[in-house]
Amino acid sequence: MADLNALPLAVLSEQFARLPGIGMKSAQRLAYHVMEMSEEEVNEFAKALVNARKTVHTCEVCQNFTENEKCIFCSDPRRDGSTICVVESPKDISAFERTKEYKGVYHVLHGLISPIDGVTPDMLKIKELLARVNGGGINEVIMATNPTVEGEATAMYITKLLRPFGVKVTRLAFGLPIGGMLEYADEMTLFKALENRCEI
């Protein structure tokens, strides 16, 4: 941080560096870019951050991010409410929507079980999923967690919890690369993974 000659710039860089995927060099570039913005642009940027944090919350049904009580998928009567696609995070929903093939609804876990990182099942939105299935009307639950060790462990854990409900539980077919992330998969790979899913 010695090359930043003003403490506020160093602090701003450190804040940018806390974001995922942003290293210290990128953080410094972003901090310098902010200094080149007009005061009005900086205020709009700051306002957008604060506004998003204040107004966006989780959907009361699927735990996706929304401004309303229910997200656009849960409130859409054209969606097939009998099929739930379980994903790790809200950004994974965008990946599925790009395929234009999935017509069901979603459930966002907001993480994966990871003992190494201290993430336990009770920290995820699993209880909410079980409550939805227990409420009836669900025919299939698609486990669409990433094909990583944590994703597989989470899928198997939830599958065991769902068995007593008698619903069909499927897992995405392995058209997705092991260790890959859903948000980076192309539309055809995701479509094939959905099409070739199998019961677990």
Image (spheres, rainbow, N blue to C red):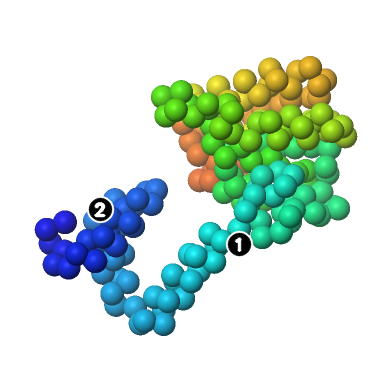
Q: Which numbered tag is attached to residue 55?
A: 1
Q: Residue at x 60, y 62 (%)?
A: 55
Give how far across and how far down residue 21 sits, in percent: 37, 49
Which amino acid is tagged 1? Thr
Give how far across and how far down residue 41 sits, in percent: 41, 79
Badge 2 crowding class, 10 Å Cα cut-off, few under 14, some 14 to 19, many 20 or more, is: some
Residue 160 vertical position relative to residue 197 in the rendered view, above or below: above
Q: Residue at x 74, y 44 (%)?
A: 61
Residue 136 vertical position relative to residue 38 in the rendered view, above or below: above
Q: Residue at x 84, y 37 (%)?
A: 82
Asked if residue 99 can be seen in this view, the reply is no
Q: Which numbered tag is attached to residue 24?
A: 2
Which image quarter: residue 199?
Answer: top right
Q: Residue at x 65, y 31 (%)?
A: 126
Give how far across and how far down residue 133 sits, in percent: 79, 31
SS for tag 2? helix
Question: Is 191 or 124 nearer to us in this picture?
Answer: 124
Residue 135 vertical position relative to residue 152 in the rendered view, above or below: below
Which amino acid is tagged 2? Met
In this picture, residue 93 sits left or right of residue 111: right
Which image quarter: residue 72?
Answer: bottom right
Q: CA distance from mark 1 to mark 2?
A: 30 Å
Q: How many marks?
A: 2
Q: Quadrant of the N terminus?
A: bottom left
In this picture, residue 118 sits left or right of residue 63: left
Residue 93 vertical position relative to residue 36 in the rendered view, above or below: above
Q: Quadrant of the C terminus?
A: top right
Give how far across and how far down residue 89 sits, in percent: 57, 43
In this picture, residue 157 sits left or right of residue 35: right
